[in-house]
Image (cartoon, grey):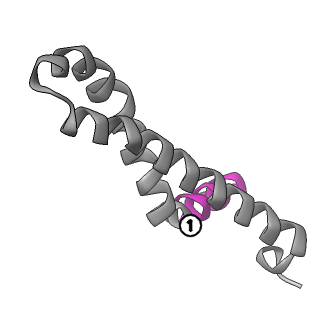
Amino acid sequence: MAASANPANIVNRGITRWIFRWIHLVFSIPILGYIYSPFDKIPQYARPTRYVFVPVMILSGLWMWKGHVVRRLLSKRSAGGTAYSSG
């Protein structure tokens, strides 16, 4: 049986996906507040939005989109050796 077909591994991936999805949704709420807040309140929200909420949303979205590629690359590296031949 392959390692990816292990039932515990499938449950773990499902929980990880669920956590990243909720992080993505929760960190989008302040961005909506930033967009729809009155103009005089925008400077108060600008710094946390720019340096916390947007980067976390981008990273969680990228992980949900291409996390399988990163996991595959990390598993190849931890297995020892690279895909490049020296010769």
Q: Residue 36: x and y, percent? A: 20, 39
Q: Is residue 72 visible?
A: yes
Q: Amino acid at mark 1?
A: His
| Vertical position of residue 19 compared to residue 72: above or below | above
10 Å crowding of disc 1: few (<14), some (14-19), many (20+): few
Regarding mark 1 in the picture, which secondary structure is present there? helix
Query: Majority secondary structure of the magenta segment?
Result: helix
Quarter of the view holding residue 62 = bottom left
Q: Image height check: is 57 above or below 73?
A: above
> Would you say 39 lies left or right of 2 here?
left
Residue 8 left/right relative to 65: right
Residue found 36% across the figure and 34% down from its top? 30
Rendering quarter of residue 55: top left
Of residues 43 and 48, the one nearer the viewer is: 43
- Relative to 25, is 39 on the left or the right? left
Quarter placement of the N terminus: bottom right
Extreme residue in the front direction? 38
Q: Nearer the viewer, residue 85 or 67?
A: 67
Task: State yes or no: residue 72 in magenta.
Answer: yes
- Residue under the point 57% across and 51% down: 22
**Disc 1 designates what residue?**
68
* Number of numbered tags placed on the structure image: 1
Corner quadrant of residue 56: top left
Image coordinates for residue 81, horizontal then vertical, percent:
63, 56
Q: Visible in this render: residue 87? A: no
The residue positioned 50% from the left and 61% from the top of the image is 64
**Magenta-highlighted residues:** 70-83
Judging depth in this view, the residue of 6 and 74 nearest the camera is 6
Is the residue 83 above or below the residue 7 in the image? above
